[in-house]
Image (cartoon, rainbow, N blue to C red):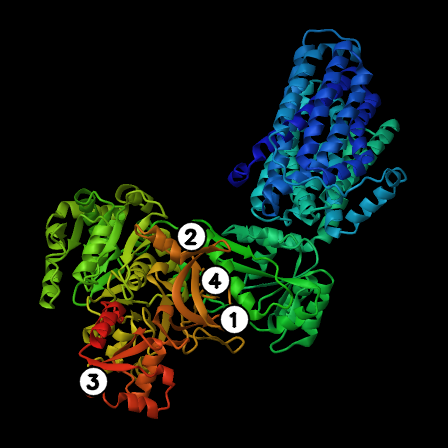
């Protein structure tokens, strides 16, 4: 509802609807109550029925002209003209009241109805124009609620005014009563003027259709009427919806006409306020039911309520004649109204959904026509039955019989909706559905739905989101199960076996050509990794010759549910609150010839929208951590490789103690941290976040100038470090005294000494015994999910380090994505060796285990592989992350034995390209695969990762998680686009180009460098894309391959040569796969550029060129100059320092 209220023009629109219904009802109440007071018996029933008939007749007579006006002219202008007419009519009504002209006032009901008949198609058509298709359910719920609210208010107000003006006054005729009501006429005029004023505030959404002409001859002979009726009858969905609405409102009209007599004759009531009040309870119920229907139909249309509501209405009508108390009747009318609201809102929404843009006026006017013909017919029968002395109680019982027939018919025609509603009721007890892209669902024609397959209840979620019935394609082995087959056959499921099943594919083609919706999961089975599996291409055969479109969709929220194949730990971690939020996103329609690779790319893009919705429910990092601590309690949270384990309770206790001091000692927003990978480093980082600070972990392996620049750029005045750590750095030749001169350096050894035992015990007891919500309120400073959580200064491998600002949302989403892909299990332990200043180290090996409750083992030196291996063996670590450079050290060190690493489940390499030699040697030595990941500091950092293949023992198929030479598929919620580097136009699948990364994890921007931010952030397709500067391609299965950085290409005689390829070629030619080297491009007077190669530790390099020539290497890839150097310049992460390497190459080449 909040979203609707923000739409320009919506508030004036609903206020105008309220006033229009309020005025119409006001005059009707005056006339109806006058009839009640001055007529009795059958005359009263007949006149009441005639009043209602006069209201309905214009909707029949003006069906075609009102539709024409609504379709030809902007609907806001039609409503404005109708408002002017209402002012004139209410003025005439007021005159009739003053003069006591009862039959003239009676006839004025007919004129008001003419105004409403012209106004109604424009009103309902304007809803869709104003709120859009996606909000039709909610919009109709709001309109129905406000209309019913106006009716309720009108009943009470005008009945009270009626009784007020009659109080203590004798009257003998209808004319006497009307004269007493004269002041009410001015109320009607005033309200009509307000309606007119509001009509001028409605925005115009369409232009006048000058080509549309009204054929009066066709109208006069009824040809236009028949044509328009054929239009609505030809669409079963529209026609059935109109029939349902017609029966409901016809029953309502008869109740309104007969119940006053029933109340007088059976219940002995004469007060019109009491009688109208009981009827008004129906209106209150309709308001409640409409609002409920709107909430059930959030971003979609929930038709599953229809069979249940229809049956409930029939039961309520049967009960009505058996009740004799005012309270009993009021409650029954309330229930009848609630069921009515649940019934009419989805039907109105369905009519608007299926009506074409240019035909909406005709369809909606046709809806009015049919409804009013049926209502008029029912009222005519009511007059007839009154003439032959059928009592009001008998009439009500007859209505109940009609309602039963209607309910049976509804259940017969909508069996899928009934089952869907039952399923949705069961599912909604634990799951909450959000639908995006609802407007992309075609209202008619064949549609092939293709999406990801995550759980056993995917079919129910897809059907709940769609207003159209869906035929699902399913595996024949499941279809043939005896306890399911009858049910599945009844609902039109399509069985398909493995391989090419031509009969099933032909059936799908036929259904699509018949205009039906078919859903197929191209993966063929439920995902075992949460990631998209390989797409089977059978759907291409079915779709190729079908007159249909392909509609891609993506579901998020079911991985980690009890119906998925995720791990038990992930299921436990993903339980939060009473409900699990599920999002389904429908994309734009694609051609029926769209390839599997294109559809897969579309699904990845839709996943970004789904994760955007998911991220809105995430908490900032420290608040999420507190929830985890309360779940995990005394379980081990972290431990240093040579230290004592810390439980979650004790880790949070220490962090709270530190955060209190950080709040006082560091008034600035950014806090500097110069700490190793350790429990102390992790606790201090979390302490900073609890204090709502922005973390800046300083890169102590960078140059003094780089560190000083970072401190200055981030306005850091306070740095937290450790004396022991600083001393160790000093022994390694890293002197930081100059860097820390201008800041307030606080050492953790000193900070720890300020923590008193009483204080820490009180915090520990609070952490153990207070609920999470109270802990957050007391110890966690307020912060927003979009606040900057950390500033990471990039590795600087290609220039001056940049301050990358990452929000809590960026980091929370990325760690959740990684956790989902790793499918973390109860036995998992993360081996944390990467530094905290590194994005991979901060997000994956520190924040992820803390937030997900996974034990973490810390070791400060990633090159100390022997002690890391000992820690892995001691704590049975299962997840190890590193760079190719660091992982190579495990293969070379004999003291790092295979058995020491046998607990590892997953080893991930990132930050630099994984050497083929490292991958093969690691596998050979440790019998463990290395899976390569890809990303950037700017993407928090992980964008893609390879994961282990998974065997499906039910169908004996393998879900591929990695491909050699690739960095895996994009994480769920992440999309990769390959574009032309100059034009930024997307390239065909498989073609090399510039890699763009889109997703929620894309950084906020560079610190104090908006120009640089704008140069790398691209807004397109509603997604923020990061320009990586890397060259690569994506294959048909969605796997990403990296060629090199565009900056690492040399242009020789017009040809682009990859420097990375040059390096690999040299290693192969020299048969030294572990050789440390770097190729640099420098300016050259002859060829434009030349390649300079530097080899580490190679004394004699005279024969290198000859070896390359003898190996028949591409001449363009043979370096122009080759030098031997002591070491190739490296960064702290182990990556090559290209800036330093270029400077060295220039120096050597001089």
Q: Are marks 4 and 1 in contact (CB under 8 Å)?
A: no
Label 4 neighbourhood size at 10 Å, few (<14), some (14-19), many (20+)? some
Disc sitting over residue 878 in the figure? none
Asked whether the viewer can see residue 80, the reply is: yes
Q: Are marks 2 and 1 in contact (CB under 8 Å)?
A: no
> Which residue does the image show at 13% across and 61% down from the upper left?
725
**Tag 4–tag 2 contact (CB < 8 Å):** no
Q: What label does residue 984 carry, if any?
A: 4
Question: Residue placed at 68% from the left, 36% from the top?
Answer: 75
In the rendering, at what x and y percent does residue 745 appear? 13, 51
The residue carrying mark 1 is 989
User: Along the polypeptide, which appears first: circle 2 or circle 1?
Assistant: 2
Of labels 2 and 3, earlier in sequence is 2
Q: CA distance from mark 2 to mark 3?
A: 52 Å
The circle drawn on residue 615 is: 2
Residue 63 falls in image quadrant: top right
Q: Which residue is mark 3?
A: 1098
Residue 88 drawn above or below residue 67: above
In three-dimensional space, the C-alpha distance between marks 2 and 1, rounded to whole angstroms, equals 30 Å
Q: Give how far across and how far down residue 150 sits, in percent.
A: 63, 28
Front in this rendered view, residue 146 or 910: 910
């Amino acid at each position: 509802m909040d979203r609707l209220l923000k739409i320009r023009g919506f508030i004036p629109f609903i206020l105008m609807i309220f006033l229009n219904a309020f005025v119409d009802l006001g005059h009707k109440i005056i006339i109806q109550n006058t009839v009640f007071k001055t007529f009795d018996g059958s005359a009263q029933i007949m006149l009441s029925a005639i009043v209602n008939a006069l209201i309905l007749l214009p909707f029949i007579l003006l069906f075609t002209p009102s539709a024409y006006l609504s379709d030809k002219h902007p609907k806001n202008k039609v409503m404005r003209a109708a408002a002017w007419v209402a002012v004139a009519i209410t003025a005439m009504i007021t005159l009739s009241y003053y003069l006591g002209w009862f039959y003239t006032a009676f006839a004025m009901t007919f004129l008001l109805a003419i105004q409403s008949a012209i106004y109604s198609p424009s009103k309902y058509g304007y809803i869709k124009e104003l709120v859009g298709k996606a909000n039709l359910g909610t919009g109709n719920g709001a309109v129905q609620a406000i209309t019913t609210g106006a009716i309720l208010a009108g009943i009470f107000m005008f009945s009270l005014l009626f009784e007020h003006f009659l109080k203590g006054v004798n009257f003998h005729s209808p004319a006497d009563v009307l004269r007493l009501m004269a002041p009410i006429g001015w109320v009607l005029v005033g309200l009509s003027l307000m309606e007119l004023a509001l009509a001028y505030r409605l925005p115009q959404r369409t232009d006048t259709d000058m080509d549309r002409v009204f054929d009066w001859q066709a109208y006069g002979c009824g040809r236009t009427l028949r044509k328009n009726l054929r239009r609505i009858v030809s669409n079963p969905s529209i026609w059935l919806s109109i029939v349902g609405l017609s029966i409901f409102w016809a029953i309502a009209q008869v109740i309104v006409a007969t119940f006053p007599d029933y109340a007088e004759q059976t219940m002995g009531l004469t007060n019109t306020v009491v009688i109208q009040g009981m009827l008004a309870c129906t209106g209150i119920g309709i308001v409640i039911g409409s609002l409920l229907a709107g909430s059930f139909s959030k971003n979609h249309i929930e038709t599953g309520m229809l069979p249940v509501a229809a049956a409930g209405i029939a039961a309520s009508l049967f009960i009505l004649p058996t009740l004799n108390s005012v309270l009993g009747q009021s409650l029954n009318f309330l229930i009848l109204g609630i069921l009515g609201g649940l019934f009419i809102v989805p039907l109105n929404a369905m009519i608007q959904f299926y009506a074409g843009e240019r035909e909406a006026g005709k369809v909606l006017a046709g809806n009015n026509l049919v409804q009013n013909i049926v209502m008029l017919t029912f009222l005519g029968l009511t007059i007839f039955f009154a003439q032959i002395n059928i009592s009001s109680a008998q009439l009500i019982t007859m209505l109940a019989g009609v309602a039963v027939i209607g309910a049976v018919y509804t259940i017969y025609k909508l069996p899928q909706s009934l089952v869907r509603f039952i399923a949705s009721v069961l599912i909604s007890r634990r799951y909450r559905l959000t639908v995006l892209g609802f407007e992309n669902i075609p209202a008619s024609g064949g549609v092939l739905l293709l999406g990801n397959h995550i759980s056993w209840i995917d079919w129910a979620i897809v059907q709940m989101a769609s207003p159209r019935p869906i035929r699902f394609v399913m595996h024949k082995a499941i279809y043939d199960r005896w306890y399911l087959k009858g049910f599945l056959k009844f609902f039109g499921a399509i069985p398909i076996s493995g391989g090419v099943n031509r009969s099933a594919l032909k059936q799908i083609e036929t259904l699509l050509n018949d205009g039906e919706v078919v859903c197929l999961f191209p993966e063929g089975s439920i995902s075992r990794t949460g990631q998209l599996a390989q797409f089977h291409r059978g759907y291409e055969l079915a779709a190729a010759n079908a007159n249909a479109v392909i509609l891609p969709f993506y579901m998020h929220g079911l991985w980690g549910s009890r119906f998925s194949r995720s791990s038990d730990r992930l299921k436990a971690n993903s339980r939060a609150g009473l409900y699990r939020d599920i999002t389904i996103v429908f994309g734009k329609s694609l051609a029926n010839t769209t390839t599997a690779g294109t559809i897969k790319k579309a699904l990845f893009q839709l996943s970004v929208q789904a994760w955007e919705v998911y991220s809105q429910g995430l908490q900032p990092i420290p608040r999420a951590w507190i929830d985890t601590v309360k779940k995990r309690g005394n379980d081990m949270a972290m431990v240093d490789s040579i230290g004592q384990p810390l439980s979650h309770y004790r880790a949070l206790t220490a962090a709270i103690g530190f955060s209190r001091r950080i709040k006082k000692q560091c008034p600035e927003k950014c806090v500097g941290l110069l700490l190793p990978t350790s429990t102390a480093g992790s606790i201090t980082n979390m302490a900073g976040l609890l204090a709502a600070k922005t973390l800046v972990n300083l890169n102590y392996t960078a140059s003094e100038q780089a560190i000083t620049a970072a401190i200055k750029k981030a306005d850091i005045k306070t740095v937290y470090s450790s004396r022991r750590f600083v001393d160790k750095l000093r022994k390694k030749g890293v002197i930081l005294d100059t860097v820390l001169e201008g800041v307030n350096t606080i050492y953790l050894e000193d900070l720890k000494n300020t923590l008193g035992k009483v204080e820490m015990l009180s915090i520990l007891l609070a952490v153990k015994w207070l609920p999470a919500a109270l802990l957050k309120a007391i110890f966690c400073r307020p912060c927003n999910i979009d606040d900057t959580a950390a500033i990471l200064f990039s590795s600087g491998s290609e220039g001056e380090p940049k301050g990358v600002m990452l929000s809590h949302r960026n980091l929370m989403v990325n760690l959740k994505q990684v956790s989902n892909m790793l499918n973390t299990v109860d036995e998992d332990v993360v081996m944390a060796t990467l530094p905290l200043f590194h994005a991979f180290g901060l997000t994956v090996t520190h924040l992820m285990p803390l937030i997900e409750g996974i034990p973490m083992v810390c070791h400060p030196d990633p090159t100390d592989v022997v002690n890391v291996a000992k820690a892995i063996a001691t704590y049975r670590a299962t997840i190890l992350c590193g760079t190719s450079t660091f992982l190579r050290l495990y293969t070379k060190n004999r003291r790092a034995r295979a058995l020491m690493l046998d607990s590892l489940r997953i080893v991930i390499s990132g930050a630099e390209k994984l050497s083929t030699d490292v991958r093969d040697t690691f596998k050979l030595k440790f019998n463990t695969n290395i899976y390569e990941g890809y990303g950037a500091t700017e993407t928090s950092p992980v964008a893609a990762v390879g994961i282990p293949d998974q065997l499906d023992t039910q169908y004996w198929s393998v879900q591929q998680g990695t491909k050699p030479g690739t960095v895996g598929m994009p994480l769920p919620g992440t999309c990769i686009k390959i574009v032309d580097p100059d034009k930024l136009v997307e390239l065909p699948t498989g073609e090399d180009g510039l890699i763009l990364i889109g997703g929620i994890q894309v950084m906020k921007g560079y610190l104090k460098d908006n120009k640089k931010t704008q140069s790398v952030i691209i807004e397109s397709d509603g997604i923020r894309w990061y320009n990586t500067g890397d060259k690569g391609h994506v294959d048909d299965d969605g796997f990403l391959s990296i060629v090199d950085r565009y900056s690492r290409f040399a242009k020789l005689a017009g040809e682009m040569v990859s420097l990375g390829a040059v390096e690999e070629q040299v290693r192969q030619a020299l048969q030294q796969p572990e050789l440390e080297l770097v190729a640099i491009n420098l300016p050259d007077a002859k060829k434009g550029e030349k390649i300079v190669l530097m080899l580490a530790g190679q004394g004699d390099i005279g024969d290198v060129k000859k070896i390359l020539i003898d190996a028949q290497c591409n001449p363009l890839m043979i370096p122009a100059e080759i030098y031997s150097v002591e070491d190739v310049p490296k960064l702290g992460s182990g990556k090559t320092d290209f800036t330093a390497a270029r400077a060295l190459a220039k120096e050597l080449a001089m």
